[in-house]
């Protein structure tokens, strides 16, 4: 990699959402249910290809979590990105199907690398990370809806996880059966409720163009996602189905039994979907990064999201989706001579989801540019903050903000509002990344007796 010039931040978009993301990949392992029709089997982690960038990095380091984290920290430092606030994502198939010993050692390796030394056990590593130079402010686990039992959730909470991404793909049991998905819609609904009640932020991986679907049906599926109280995810990753080498779908394609959408069909559909995404949901990604040599059929446009965003901006349609409105991206795309309106207001949206009451608080300006958000869930006598996030370029811990965004007091403002809303409940819980515990302690919160949530009596 070419060394950046002094003061130059290489690939600045990487940290515009306020954190520095590091993805680590677990070793290859077959899924217990078998293989989905569209999933390639190429002796690398399930659903990936040998030349996918995260696979190349992980394979070179023998899938060692400690070495992977050190490698990414070094790369971000070379690109002049801050590395104090780290969001970790564990990728590579269903992590919760590995042995418990493997899981614990893998997670411990992540914390040890961030801490710069090896601790005697996971709990010690987590405790040390509370004040480390590189703090884990969020930990995401990728898994399946049928791997979200109460026991699975207990383990994830013990690791310090704050977000779970589940491979939902569609909302149709007939399609699930056709593609050998191995679970049903009922398990998606149950997993979603359990995860929300435990405080997790939830992401769905959704697929377009699956065998048995069509553009009209796909659009209806996304409408159902946000109309039906049993779903309503906080985040989405949208992946059009592609025919990849090593997948059983290749045979269907060659026999004329399956055809993926064209690039034009895909883009038209994604534009329609983006127009119905509510203000409480963030579309994390559109398209997967598949090397063209592994693609048998399907669109190759990795930058489809950029084209979609440009089309939406030209259309002048009011887009509510989170990423489209974030202050970090607004500043990046700001035209010369223009300024961001810094007069802010608080907006609160209340909605029902998975048997609970959700409050989505956001701080925006009159152009609806998003500066910060907070998710509060009240279910029965339990009130829990599922996310508190201030957007804008990631800043080092302790560094004062030069403009509105991180470290400008917006987080405290949001928490005060949440405490008012949750006043009827005796205690407020917060699901917190290990590296954010110190921040909450300064605001009067303490770690509960199980070492899981930050709590405060109201």
Image: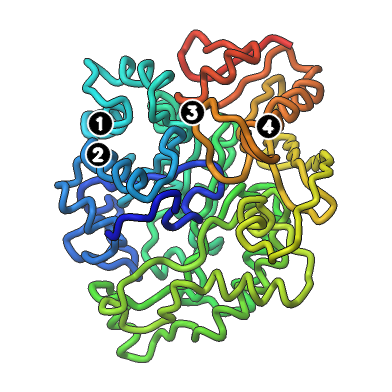
Q: Residue at x 75, y 77 (%)?
A: 315
Q: 396 or 68, which lies in front? A: 396
Graded by Cα atoms within 10 Å as few (under 14), some (14 to 19) or many (20 or more), the crowding at tag 4 reads some
For the residues bearing labels 3 and 2, Cβ distance under 8 angstroms: no
Please give the label number shown on residue 408: 4
Please give the label number shown on residue 109: 1
For the residues bearing labels 3 and 4, Cβ distance under 8 angstroms: no
For the residues bearing labels 1 and 4, Cβ distance under 8 angstroms: no
Give me the C-alpha separation between circle 3 and circle 2: 18 Å
For the residues bearing labels 1 and 2, Cβ distance under 8 angstroms: yes
Q: Where 223 sits versus 161, above or below? A: below
Asked if residue 312 shows in the view, the reply is yes
Q: Name the residue under label 2.
A: 65
Graded by Cα atoms within 10 Å as few (under 14), some (14 to 19) or many (20 or more), the crowding at tag 1 reads many
Q: In this view, does 168 lie to the left or right of 99?
A: right
Question: Which callout, 3 or 2, points at the residue further toward the start of the chain?
Answer: 2
- Secondary element at tag 4: loop
Q: Is residue 294 left or right of residue 215?
A: left
Question: Which callout, 2 or 4, points at the residue further toward the start of the chain?
Answer: 2
Q: Where 395 sits versus 38, above or below? A: above
Q: Which residue is drawn at 33% across and 47% down?
A: 78
For the residues bearing labels 3 and 1, Cβ distance under 8 angstroms: no
Mark 3 vs mark 4: in front = 4
Q: Name the residue under label 3.
A: 433
- Secondary element at tag 3: loop
Question: Which callout, 3 or 1, points at the residue further toward the start of the chain?
Answer: 1
Q: 308 or 145, which lies in front? A: 308
Question: Which callout, 1 or 4, points at the residue further toward the start of the chain?
Answer: 1
Q: Which x, y percent locates residue 416?
A: 76, 23
Question: Which callout, 3 or 4, points at the residue further toward the start of the chain?
Answer: 4
- Determine the image quadrant of residue 223: bottom right
Give me the C-alpha separation between circle 3 and circle 1: 16 Å
């Amino acid at each position: 990699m070419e060394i950046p010039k002094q003061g130059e931040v290489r690939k600045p978009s990487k940290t515009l959402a306020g954190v520095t993301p590091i993805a680590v990949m677990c070793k290859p392992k077959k899924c217990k249910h078998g293989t989905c029709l569209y999933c390639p089997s190429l002796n690398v982690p399930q659903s990936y290809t040998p030349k996918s960038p995260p696979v190349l990095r992980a394979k070179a380091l023998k899938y060692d979590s400690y070495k992977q984290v050190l490698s990414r920290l070094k790369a971000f430092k070379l690109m002049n990105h801050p590395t104090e606030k780290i969001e970790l994502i564990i990728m590579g198939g269903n992590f919760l199907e590995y042995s418990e010993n493997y899981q614990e050692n893998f997670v411990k390796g992540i914390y040890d690398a961030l801490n710069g030394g090896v601790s005697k056990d996971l709990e010690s590593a987590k405790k040390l990370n509370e004040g480390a130079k590189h703090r884990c402010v969020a930990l995401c686990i990728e898994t399946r809806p049928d791997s979200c039992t109460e026991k699975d959730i207990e383990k994830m909470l013990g690791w310090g996880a704050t977000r779970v991404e589940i491979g939902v793909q569609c909302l149709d049991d007939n399609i699930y059966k056709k593609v050998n998905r191995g679970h049903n819609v009922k398990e998606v609904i149950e997993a979603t409720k359990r995860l929300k009640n435990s405080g997790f932020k939830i992401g769905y991986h959704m697929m377009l163009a699956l065998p048995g679907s069509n553009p009209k049906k796909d659009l209806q599926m996304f409408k159902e996602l946000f109309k039906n109280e049993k779903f309503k995810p906080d985040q989405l990753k949208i992946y059009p189905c592609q025919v990849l080498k090593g997948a059983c779908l290749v045979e269907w394609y060659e026999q004329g039994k399956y055809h993926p959408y064209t690039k034009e069909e895909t883009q038209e559909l994604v534009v329609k979907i983006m127009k119905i995404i509510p203000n409480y949901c963030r579309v994390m990604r559109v398209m997967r990064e598949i090397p063209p040599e592994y693609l048998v059929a399907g669109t190759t446009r990795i930058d489809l999201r950029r084209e979609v965003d440009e089309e939406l901006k030209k259309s002048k349609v009011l887009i509510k989706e989170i990423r489209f409105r974030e202050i970090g991206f607004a500043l990046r795309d700001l035209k010369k001579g223009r300024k961001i309106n810094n007069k802010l207001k608080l907006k609160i949206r209340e909605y029902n989801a998975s048997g609970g009451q959700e409050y989505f608080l956001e701080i925006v300006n009159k152009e609806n540019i998003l500066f910060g958000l907070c998710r509060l869930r009240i279910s029965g006598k339990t009130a829990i903050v599922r996310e508190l996030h201030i957007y804008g370029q990631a800043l080092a811990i302790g560094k004062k903000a030069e403009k509105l965004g991180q470290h400008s007091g917006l987080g405290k403002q949001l928490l005060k509002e949440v405490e008012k809303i949750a006043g009827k409940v005796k205690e407020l819980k917060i699901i917190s990344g290990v590296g954010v515990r110190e921040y909450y302690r300064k605001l009067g919160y303490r770690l509960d007796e199980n070492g899981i949530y930050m709590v405060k009596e109201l």
